[in-house]
Each structure stands twice: as structure tokens, then as C-alpha cells.
Amino acid sequence: MELYNLTIHELHEKLQKKEITSLQLTEAFLKRIEAVDGKIKAYITVTKEDSIKQAKEADKRLASGKDITPLTGVPISVKDIFCTNGVRTTCASKILNNFVPPYDAAVIKKLKDAGAVILGKNNMDEFAMGSSTENSAYFVTKNPWDVERVPGGSSGGSAASVAAGECTASIGTDTGGSIRQPASCCGIVGLKPTYGRVSRYGMIAFASSLDQAGPMTKDVTDCAIMMNTMAGYDPQDSTSIDAPVPDYTKALTKDVKGLKIGIPKEYFIKGLDSDVEKAVKDAIEVLKKQGASVVDISLPHTDYAIAVYYLVATAEASSNLARFDGVKFGHRAKDSKNLLDMYCKTRDEGFGPEVKRRIMLGTYSLSAGYYDAYYKKASQVRTLIKRDFEEVFKKCGVILTPTAPTPAFKIGEKTADPLTMYLSDIFTISCNLAGIPGLSLPCGFTKDNLPIGLQILGKPLDEETVLKTAYSYEQATEWHKKRAGVEN
């Protein structure tokens, strides 16, 4: 098998045995990016010189035998929403076209400290607002399984780079499904940890009470390895949870005997693709054969999730994006008559249509006379959604659902209808509103050979049970071994 198709744990073994060096590995991935990224367009920026330098450092570490982690010398990519010291960070927006941060985000620092090699920054929906990576100010990323289809979003570049073998793993962000939905579309594993489990310091904010960083990998083992590095308390993030971090790889056992799996009736609805429904129901049977039992559950406020999300998220976006005004950093409009004119022109030139739409929605819902009717009401219903999960977790250990109602759709299919696009996240949004962990992993393919994702939701800070369930299912099937056949 080609090196670019291998997992973190497989490459770690080869590096440990001195079968290959990190420099050789990094050069192989850079060659792969050169060969296929013209077709896939997963990267906004490739940091060739930096990655070669990091690989040489990793080789020194491997030779000394000190401070070696499972990520030492392994090439990964990162969504272009994380600040990277000395490397352009755009959020796929014209307003940050030339922004070069003077520091690393907490997650980037942790990955660098572990010895990972960062190959570059991935394309995304502008400011993480979208479900298809069609909202990037630069270009549309293609799905490696079918280049006429979207890779999902907003972490579409990250998902596509993993699926196309342009990196071993990636990190994305998830505000309403932006790790899990593209993972489903691209046939990889994506985990949104519990809100506050991974530091948001240096991660450019979309909606602060919903955003969470997480790993995107080729299998569940790699997901656990990445979490071991990424998770943990950070005093620089006021929402960070001060709780001990377990060794997630120890949770990877095939033992799900006695585990109660909740199946919510609200997630198997009219409009659910028949191939998706069959694959998810087959996955439930696999886990039953392994000793898990199934409990029918109800999450009654699911119907309100989309409406709540698009009030809470847009209100927070309106507040967070106010800082992009052309004064301290980023794009600034030329030939302005006065300060107000400069603000207006800068934001008009810098933001794309979807970002403008969400800022206007959020500003409207926060305005005098509308706050109580919209934002306040949405916050109250959000509490009810959270309580739904608290109640059902008294009856089961995890919840199983489809990740997305359909496989990856065609590029341009939903761009004219924002509401149809918003419904792509119908099964992932509640998880963010409740702040619980959620994982997507491959559970089959459609008749058109498009990947299907199975979503596993868990209790707050119980990523271990989520990973154990996912691993148990994965080891009983072969889906994670399939690779997208991207050729140059």
C-alpha cells in the first residue's frame, strides 16, 4: 500500500523501526499534494519549506529516542481557521487574505510539541459558515470519491485532504456539524469533542458557545491518538474544562457487551436517503451481534434544532465578526471618504454572500425589540434540547443516528437555496447545542459508490464510550479500509 494511504499508527511503526524517515515521508506527501491537489483543491496554503524543516527536527528526535509521541514525524494538515505563527491564516475569506498571525493556536502548539509535521492549511467555507465548502472566497474543494460532488463543510478541505491521501490526518472545527458532516461525505472518521474539551485559543471564532476543534482521521485509532494530544485544560480559553484527560487509546476495545444504544425516532424521517437508512440500520445490527442492546428513545425538541441554531449561531457570528473592520489587521478598503465609509466598504469587499447573510440575520435577532422574541427564545429552547439528551442518557450509553440525511450532493445543487443547504446539518446540530461529543465513521456506500456516515453521540466528557463503540463497529467491518481512487 502507498505511504499516503497509511494511518498514523501504521506510519508511527515504520518510523520507529527506521523503515522510513520523516523527511522521506513528508517529501512523499508533498509529491502527492503536487500530483492530485490541482484536481481536489483541498489546500489554500502548502507550507513546503516549514514542513521539511519540521520533518528534519522530527528525525533528530526519532534518532535520539527521546520525547517520541505517536505523532512524531507524521505529516498532517490543518483547517485554515487556526492561527499559525508566520503562516497566512485566511479563514477562506478575502478580509483575511494577507493575515499572518504572530502566534500559534493552542491546538497547533500541542501538535508541534508532539512532533507532528504540518503540511499546510486547508480550504473551508468562509469563516466556517457552510455545509459544502462552496462558500470559500478562493475555490470549491472537490470530493475525492466523485469530483463533481462537494466534500461537505465547513471543514471540507480537511476531510478531502485525508480522503485523497494528501495528509495522514487533519484537524477541523465543528459548530453545527462541520467535522462530522464532511467526514461522512468523504468516508473518514471525524470527532467533535465535548464543548470545552479542546482549547479554542487561537481558533478564529464563528459562534463561541458552539465552536469546537476536533480530529479528522482515516480510522478510529488515529482519532484517539489525535485526541490524546489535542485535549486538555487551557487557562487561555475561558470555556476550557479543567478535567483530567484519559488515554483515549485505552478505550479502544471491542467490548460493547451490555452497552445500551439509543435509537431516536426523530432521526429516521421522511427524506432520509434509502441507502443511508439501510447502512445505518445494518450498522445497528452489527453492534447488536457484538452484545449491545438497542433502546428506542425520543428527542422531542429535535424539530426546533435548525431554527435555534440559526438564531444562536448567527447572533454570535454578528458579534464575533464585528472585529473585522479594516483597522488593526486584514483587508482595508481604499479611497474611503471617512471612517464609517471605510468600515462599510471594507466589510462589503471582504465578506462573501453567506457571511453577510448570517451577520444580517444575527444583527437583526439581537436588535432592540427583537431580542426577546428571537435570541432569548432560541436560548430557552436550546436548554430544552440539552435536557432531552440528559433524559435519554439515563436510559442508554450512546445514541446512534445517520450523520447526514443524504450522501455528498453535486456541486451547485443547493447554492441557490440556503434553507435546503442548512438542512444538510439536521442530524448534527443538536449535538453542538447540547455541547456533547459526537463522532462520524464510515458505515457503507451508496449504489453510486459514495460514502455513508454513522453518527455516535455520547454523554458530556465521555468520548471514551463513543470511541469504544466506534472502534467495536469498525473492527467488525471493512469500510475504513476503502480508499478514494484519486489519480493525477
Image (cartoon, rainbow, N blue to C red):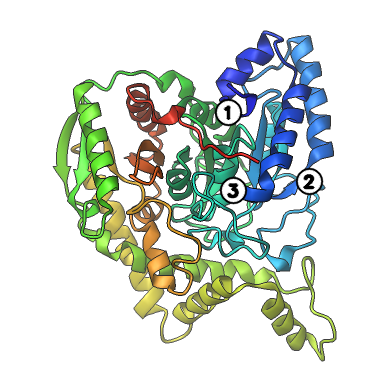
Nearer to us of marks 1 and 3 is 1
Left or right: residue 456 compared with residue 369: left
Q: Mark 2 to mark 1: distance in Å? A: 29 Å
In the image, residue 442 lies at what x, y percent? 39, 37
Three-letter amino acid code of the residue under disc 3: Arg
Q: Which residue is mark 3?
A: 200
In the image, residue 421 lies at what x, y percent? 42, 65
Left or right: residue 229 compared with residue 314: right
Q: Which is nearer the N-term, disc 2 or disc 1?
A: 1
Three-letter amino acid code of the residue under disc 1: Asn
Residue at image point 72% right, 24% down: 25
Q: Which is nearer the N-term, disc 2 or disc 3?
A: 2
Q: Quadrant of residue 225?
A: top right
Q: Are marks 2 and 1 in contact (CB under 8 Å)?
A: no
In the depicted structure, whether residue 381 falls above or below residue 279: below
Q: Which residue is mark 1?
A: 5
